[in-house]
């Protein structure tokens, strides 16, 4: 027993002397934490990088501050290298929450911007949100503060709130966007933010063809698009103008929520004998009426007419959304990926960039009112 104890003690001593300690540690006071980053295309065609860094508090009585810095370079990597030459101390992305890209740079493709993140293993990619800005993304980051909230923290809170509202969903991160750009046959959309009257506002979603920004949908359209995609946030609130004359007069603004009960979605891709492709998309939604501003009081006998009119309106809107997706060559529903997987020989014969624009979609949205609260 004593020999065994001595042997164990000897092994422990060897480990203590041979195992190295943490030789590459950094003190928090020496690190600048990047909270939000923006990339834009400058007027001279170079890359403009804008970074919000959090400067540690100088004393226990003071609080951390944020600084906004700009750098340019021939590439995103070059701009990031130049940024490190500008700021004092080291810069780390361990608290990195939002990456933005301006519209002009997004039109030229996202892969070079994404490449910066994946070449540095210390950069997080699974959680930071990826966002497109209307115009220059640097204009949003440069606001520095919204009220008393630092811009990076504000953007994280705002994006997550809009995700819960169902304006964009599911969450798109640096990692999910990178995977989407490397898998052919299915495209994606990203949150689209801008500045209106000095406020940072949601403008809908940015549409992508492969890695290239090609179009937009507004917030009303993006909420319906989330449901059409088979996804759902905590809410899907909509407000529409009603004008029904027969058999009852119903006129006013009606607000309703389609996320209180999960919609039923039927999505079918048809490949016909002549090689043509068509898509059926049917969505059965369940509405909770939350507000009605008309002079008339809602009555049970009026509800079927309201359901019918809302179904017609949302079907028309869905057709318009599909038309915009096709014009933007954004195959969000992954029709191309289905053909790659199940009809590969047919896929090889198609010029999908051309044929997707003429793809036939048969879309219907049915609305069933399941609750009116205290309105009836």
Image: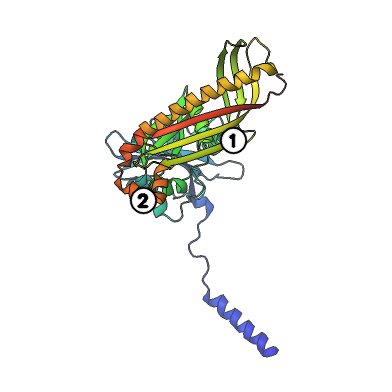
Q: Is 111 displayed left or right of 160 in the figure?
A: left
Asked if 57 appears above or below 218 in the picture, the reply is below
- Label 1: few (<14), some or many (≥20) within 10 Å? many
Q: Is 12 displayed left or right of 26 in the figure?
A: right
Name the residue furthest left.
44
Name the residue furthest front.
273
Asked if 68 appears above or below 181 in the picture, the reply is above
Q: Position of residue 78 (x, y in %)?
A: 32, 47
Q: Quick one: SS at disc 1?
A: loop
Q: Position of residue 100 (x, y in %)?
A: 43, 39
Q: Quick one: SS at disc 2?
A: helix
User: Would you say residue 164 is visible in this rendering?
Assistant: yes
Q: Quadrant of residue 251?
A: top right
Disc nearest the viewer among 1 and 2:
2
Question: What residue sits right under mark 1 in the picture?
Answer: 263
Q: Is 259 displayed left or right of 330 in the figure?
A: right
State how far apart marks 1 and 2 are (Cα): 32 Å
Q: Nearer the viewer, residue 139 or 161?
A: 161
Q: Nearer the viewer, residue 357 or 248?
A: 248
Question: What residue sits right under mark 2 in the picture?
Answer: 344
Q: Position of residue 88 (x, y in %)?
A: 43, 47
Q: Which quarter of the rendered picture does the N terminus lie within?
A: bottom right
User: In percent of the image, x 31 and y 48: which residue is there?
Assistant: 348
Q: Which numbered disc, 1 or 2, marks the residue that appears first in the sequence?
A: 1
Check whether the beta carbons of the residues at disc 1 and disc 2 lie within 8 A of each other: no
Q: Position of residue 56 (x, y in %)?
A: 53, 45
User: In percent of the image, x 50 and y 26: which residue is there?
Assistant: 315
User: In percent of the image, x 35 and y 33: which residue is there?
Assistant: 358
Q: Nearer the viewer, residue 51 or 344?
A: 344
- Label 2: few (<14), some or many (≥20) within 10 Å? few
Q: Which quarter of the rendered picture does the C terminus lie within?
A: top right
């Amino acid at each position: 027993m004593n020999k065994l104890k001595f042997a164990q003690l000897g092994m422990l001593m060897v480990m203590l002397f041979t195992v190295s300690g943490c030789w590459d540690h950094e003190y928090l006071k020496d690190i600048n934490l990047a909270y939000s980053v923006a990339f834009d295309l400058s007027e001279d065609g170079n890359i403009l990088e804008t970074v919000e860094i959090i400067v540690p508090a100088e004393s226990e009585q003071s609080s951390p501050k944020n600084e906004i810095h700009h750098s340019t370079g021939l590439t995103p990597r070059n701009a990031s290298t130049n940024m490190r030459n500008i700021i004092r101390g080291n810069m780390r992305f361990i608290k990195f929450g939002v990456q933005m890209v301006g519209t002009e740079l997004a039109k030229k493709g996202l892969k070079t911007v994404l490449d910066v993140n994946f070449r540095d293993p210390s950069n997080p990619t699974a959680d930071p949100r990826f966002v497109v800005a209307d115009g220059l993304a640097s204009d949003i980051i440069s606001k520095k503060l919204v009220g008393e909230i630092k811009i990076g923290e504000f953007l994280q809170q705002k994006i997550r709130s809009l995700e819960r509202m169902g304006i964009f969903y599911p969450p798109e991160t640096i990692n999910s966007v990178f995977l989407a750009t490397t898998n052919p046959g299915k495209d994606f959309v990203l949150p689209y933010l801008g500045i209106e009257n000095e406020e940072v506002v949601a403008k809908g979603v940015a549409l992508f063809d492969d890695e290239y920004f090609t179009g937009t949908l507004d917030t009303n359209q993006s909420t319906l698009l989330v449901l059409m995609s088979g996804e759902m946030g905590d809410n899907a609130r909509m407000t529409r103008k009603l004008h029904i004359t027969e058999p009852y007069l119903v006129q006013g603004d009606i607000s309703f929520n389609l996320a209180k009960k999960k919609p039923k979605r039927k999505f079918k891709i048809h490949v016909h004998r002549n090689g043509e492709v068509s898509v059926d998309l049917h969505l059965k939604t369940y509405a909770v009426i939350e507000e009605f501003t008309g002079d008339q009081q809602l009555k049970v006998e009026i509800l079927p007419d309201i359901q019918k009119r809302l179904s017609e309106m949302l079907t028309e809107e869905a057709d318009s959304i599909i038309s915009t997706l096709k014009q933007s060559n954004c195959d969000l529903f992954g029709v191309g990926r289905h053909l790659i997987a199940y009809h590969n020989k047919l896929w090889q014969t198609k010029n999908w960039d051309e044929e997707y624009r003429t793809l036939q979609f048969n879309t219907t949205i049915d609305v069933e009112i399941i609750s009116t609260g205290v309105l009836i």
